[in-house]
Amino acid sequence: MAEALAVEPGRDVLGSVDAYWRAANYLSVGQIYLLDNPLLREPLRVEHIKPRLLGHWGTTPGLNFVYVHLNRIIRDRGLDLMYVTGPGHGGPGLLANTWLEGSYSEDYPEVARDERGMRVLFRQFSFPGGVPSHVAPEVPGSIHEGGELGYSLAHAYGAAFDNPDLVVACVVGDGEAETGPLATSWHANKFLDPVHDGAVLPILHLNGYKIANPTVLARIPHEELDALLRGYGYAPRYVTGDDPARMHRDMASTMDDVFTEIAAIQRAARSGGVGRPRWPMIVLRSPKGWTGPSDVDGVLVEGTWRAHQVPLSGVRDNPEHLALLERWLRSYRPEELFDDSGCPVPELLEQAPTGTRRMGANPHANGGLLLTPLALPDFRDYGVLVGQHGGSSSEPTRELGRFLCEVVRRNAVSRNFRIFGPDETASNRLDAVYDATAKQWQAQLLPVDEHLATEGRVVEVLSEHLCQGWLEGYLLTGRHGLFSCYEAFIHIVDSMFNQHAKWLETSKKLAWRRPIASLNYLLTSHVWRQDHNGFSHQDPGFIDHVMNKKAEVIRVYLPPDTNTLLSVADHCLRSRDYVNVVVAGKNATPDWLSMDEAALHAARGAGIWEWAGGETGDQQPDVVLGCAGDAPTMEVMAATALLREHLPSLRVRVVNVVDLMRLQPDTEHPHGMTDREFDALFTRDRPVIFAYHGYPWLIHRLTYRRTNHANLHVRGYKEEGTTTTPFDMLVLNDMDRYRLVIDVLDRVPGLGERTALLRQRMSDARIRHHRWTREHGEDLPEVRDWTWPY
Amino acid sequence: MAEALAVEPGRDVLGSVDAYWRAANYLSVGQIYLLDNPLLREPLRVEHIKPRLLGHWGTTPGLNFVYVHLNRIIRDRGLDLMYVTGPGHGGPGLLANTWLEGSYSEDYPEVARDERGMRVLFRQFSFPGGVPSHVAPEVPGSIHEGGELGYSLAHAYGAAFDNPDLVVACVVGDGEAETGPLATSWHANKFLDPVHDGAVLPILHLNGYKIANPTVLARIPHEELDALLRGYGYAPRYVTGDDPARMHRDMASTMDDVFTEIAAIQRAARSGGVGRPRWPMIVLRSPKGWTGPSDVDGVLVEGTWRAHQVPLSGVRDNPEHLALLERWLRSYRPEELFDDSGCPVPELLEQAPTGTRRMGANPHANGGLLLTPLALPDFRDYGVLVGQHGGSSSEPTRELGRFLCEVVRRNAVSRNFRIFGPDETASNRLDAVYDATAKQWQAQLLPVDEHLATEGRVVEVLSEHLCQGWLEGYLLTGRHGLFSCYEAFIHIVDSMFNQHAKWLETSKKLAWRRPIASLNYLLTSHVWRQDHNGFSHQDPGFIDHVMNKKAEVIRVYLPPDTNTLLSVADHCLRSRDYVNVVVAGKNATPDWLSMDEAALHAARGAGIWEWAGGETGDQQPDVVLGCAGDAPTMEVMAATALLREHLPSLRVRVVNVVDLMRLQPDTEHPHGMTDREFDALFTRDRPVIFAYHGYPWLIHRLTYRRTNHANLHVRGYKEEGTTTTPFDMLVLNDMDRYRLVIDVLDRVPGLGERTALLRQRMSDARIRHHRWTREHGEDLPEVRDWTWPY
């Protein structure tokens, strides 16, 4: 029934929809231009105009058009619907619509639905101390920033996972559609389960132009575009034109069809139907800057790239432009749209959905509202037994996989935890999770497939962009997750990480945005164990990249062994509003700490391993060996053993750092140590040899203000080594045990002469090893099978 | 005629093709497994097997299959053809083929085409000190690393630009095809000019599986795949099966058709035809691990993901596996393929193309061989006249655009220079180039379009990945170019930069690889002038990212004004084998230096601006104000003016740094200053206030070993500010002139008391400004219109 209403006798309904659209457009133009006189009660004068005209008109009328039509269908059908705004700088439209429907004023009472509020709405836009021109975190109803382009559709699918009653409408701009991440995001429909997940409705908005160019998808023949979208697995419908009345009719009937189709697909799948559905999508082809000035100063503006930003730019100096602007604003007939107080007239108010059905108030878009903590098993139950420090070994990520398997099990009913990965979950040795779940996959299944199913907690696709985008969308809508990735290739999403971190930084300042689960990266198959893959797979620099973001949102952990990893993972899964970067190996690593020790060590973030150096009493050490990361810890321990054997009178201290942020001053990071704490670990004057997982200068960056910094000598990865053995990688980068011993001999005063022989032996050991690998293709047994002897 | 030969009476030809393929497959398996006994002259024993089995068989037989068929067509038609290997870890296949055709032994005489050479070929593969398992720089004929996936097709198009007689065959793996960059690369056909550019032949290799999963494109129905590829604008042809004889026939006839089609397209376009061609492409659907063991230990291997790496992994411990391996190797009948000396038999030798037609010896793939220097105008002719330091201002990138316009003009005939950008060339104010050229665009043209043409030196698409990939392909084949990009969004290609830098690092060690033109980034619309776009557009961290790569390949320049930018740009366009990062503003900036001064300053990389501080004689300064970047320089100059006005007796020194690498010790970077030089600029004991363009800690990282480091205080971007005025951005990040003056007052000993009033005035000025912006929406006139008063 509902379907029929809008299209046929719906003249009135569509008349109201048009009025609503005009109101949204009016409010959008107002934001770009007006400092004052928001209702145009008096003739427009220069002093009503903003001194700097910043904003983007081009995409806005199309976004508004979609928004008002979604409003209609939400009301008609009582839908739970979210709006993801792909096109950049669509801010004015979404601000206008959330103000119209009232959700904006609930979050920002100072921007009430009256003339005074409208004035603030206009003034604050792209104004110092105000709001940005994108659909930033400040915009109610948004989980997506329209700044950096390419991630809208991935975010939309992430939001739809495990939300079976939700429809995520996602407007994809034709500019954005040229980006790589967006181009591959279309394929996300091969991963969406119509039974347990919600629906995504992509709306490709072809307004034809970017900043300065036409767009590719708008300039290929219709048949090619249609083939492309069908090739992506969608059933596209087209709404094309520029006549508002006709376009309203077309859009309304298309929306009716499309939502009927979505409901039918879900009904069929949920009553036992099988096969991947061809989800509907809409292609909206409308002019850029639709309803704006059609030409200015004799050149065409509407329908061209010239409408991208501010179509009338000379308003303050050029009376003709000012007059044009007034005419443009008045063309929306504001006097019919707002009452005397500046409030939208009842005809408009009635059209918006109510309560949490308003897209600006949909709780999914403020995911913290819906967040429930994960049911977590006691991580201690998954630890390895450690009778003696370093007496056994285990594969950290493999043990973590067992813990994650139980996390999956315990949250199977609440369906709020997922693991994303680029085809690497098994390669990263987390495959124990497949005891409890499968990889979700909606494309063809064959008998040979393993761990694949139409529904599962693991989602794998060979696109780090998609993994990241899905996880972001999933977290921002109030769920939990993990992204496991080869360390080197996480740089593929550097820029997406940036945007998510900035989103968190901004969200934390907004009282109405509730905390969400942290974004957890598990970086494994790391630089020191890429002997298999070589130089192109070696890059530990994501940590450096992450460190540039605000301390409040960044955490970096380098657990040295299995038990510490488990403790760290448990902590990360409980945390909120952070980005946690955990770097851990998948290869067998000595179990240095018992579970109790590991939990304490992880909580402290850094500490002295007295048992390693054999420290007794409170004498100061002669040298400190610091380490962060599993491979560096191993080498520091081996170096310590060599020193204890050959120079038993040398007092060696081993300091292990799990939480990298501890190294910073407490004034720089909430986890930072005070100088007093730092000095207690690293002394004020003894040489410190520090073996670090990544690029060595990061440790200097974190510690340059410390008392003992001048005595700090850091070893780490320095872009050496390619396909070789694990130990040879260490040798080539000067971080092997022998080199560390030599570093100690070089730096502890007074050792020089009497240790010449030891120095020579260390040096010989390096050369012998290097030669052996080139001869035999593997590490010397004495290195391969080394165990901690104490 | 040639077309017919292979298909019909071609039994013999195809028999030879098959023999060649068997040889390539044999050599590939040998590389993965064998330490010795390369010709299987004796029964295979454990000691012939490598101790660590590292390598990837799965993709290899398909790559070999394509290679041998391309060989046939090259010989038949005398084609100039390059091979780009998208699938990861395809190393064994390309090493095998280049060895077979002889190009490998020319670059590596120790790996001759005989038994001894074959033994080295086998042994070195994935072996310490040997060669990686990807198609790395070490592989002749390659411009593409198969490590990080996603860029093959972009590289192929980059190589084809301006090479009208070249065909670039590009094998795209179905794993790689899931990545974002690859997904959008298909659209590159809208930018390829059939008249002046070469052809790209994409060969989508559907072997169905990644490491642990099926691939999306192999598991959608044929009609969907076909629609997708047609939607991308190609005319796909399919070669499907697993029976070698049938597959050889199909592939040969398909290749014949496809190359005939390419020739016809080019003929038509070059004789005046118009319209974008539907270029042919091939879809090869063949089993993963084709011709390998079909099942092992009772599970299916051939044709599944289990064939991805090493299908028989227990060869050293499991006699059954060893026997299987021997059977597998012998199934290629090596005795028919190699003569007694280990050289390929004449039947094979005859099949390979000769000389530079061999794909391993194609000079385009060693672009330095073809590189000719750009014809550059004298950059001095494009400078701005500077009568007085800071007496005028100009927009640096706009002036650079005039210089680039002339670069375009002078190299119009040689067609070896291109500018790539994500829809931002005009926004970045380089639009003067459109006086000499246009943006290349092969999709539909409309009368409203400006600066668009089927051929042009500028290539714009809204994908940083494509821009980077195209430029890399263009440079690696011996041409020159520039990538201009918004500073914040260059992080989108962090990982691509990594791989290119690593490629350069490795190439420099290979005597046979000739130097290529540097990859030049012009980062503009930078962090300090994103007041328009806000927080999500603010990130100066690409510099930090770049600094992690080896000093030999990295250069970073921060020219403070127009003339310095011109000098830097000229230098970068002449340089070889570097990545040059140039950060420059597009907004009006004071012209601090005359052209002569600028050229000298750029050449020195850093220097004292005596005229700014008003230094006289050789007295030590009381304070040093350092700066790097245009906005920081402006603020340091304004702070200097305030200090000269209010504290005329204070001796101020201004040091400007253009070349960031100068700050490092000379032991760390070839551009680094000695300690003596550094001390001469920054003193050994005076306070240094340093205003830096990016994240402040980078300056500490570069200078922590310097004598005066403890007195160094750095200001920079610290993730503050969003949509606001330019000066307010500086205030929010504590880098404004007033804050710098306060820093000086705080740090120069003995100033405290007598400057309390000045301190108060500076503090008031900040507050006054901040309030003004929030009231008026723009900067205070005294800041907006400030000019250097001396």
Image (tube, coloured by chain):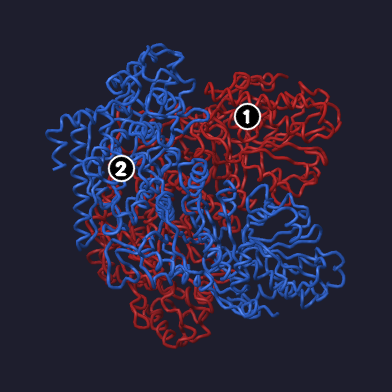
Chain colours: A blue, B red
Q: Mark 1 lies on which chain?
A: B
Amino acid under disc 1: Asp
Task: Kindly state the secondary structure of the residue where label 1 is placed.
Answer: loop
**In the image shown, does A513 or B729 lie closer to the viewer?**
A513
**Residue drawn 21% across and 54% down?**
A265
| In front: label 1 or label 2 | 2
**Residue assigned mark 1:** B561
Going by the image, does B747 lie left or right of B423? right
**In the image shown, does B327 or A435 lie closer to the viewer?**
A435
Amino acid under disc 2: Arg
Distance between the Cα atoms at labels 1 and 2? 54 Å
Q: Residues within 10 Å of mark 2 (few under 14, many from 20)?
A: some
**Residue drawn 67% across and 78% down?**
A788
Going by the image, does A442 lie left or right of A735? left
Above or below for B599 versus A413: above
Task: Kindly state the secondary structure of the residue where label 2 is placed.
Answer: helix
**Residue drawn 15% across and 30% down?**
A11
Displayed quadrant of residue A610: bottom right
Displayed quadrant of residue A313: top left
Q: How crowded is mark 1: few (under 14 residues within 10 Å), some or many (20 or more)?
A: many
Q: Which chain carries label 2?
A: A
In the image, residue A369 lies at what x, y percent?
Answer: 41, 49
Above or below for B200 versus B380: below
**Residue assigned mark 2:** A357
Instruction: Answer whether labels 1 and 2 touch (C-beta < 8 Å).
Output: no
In the image, residue B496 lies at what x, y percent?
Answer: 50, 51
- Residue B171 is at least partly visible in this image: yes
Rendered-image quadrant of the N terminus of chain B = bottom left
Q: Do labels 1 and 2 share a chain?
A: no
Above or below for B256 versus A304: below
- Residue B96 is at least partly visible in this image: no
In the image, residue B184 lies at what x, y percent?
Answer: 37, 48
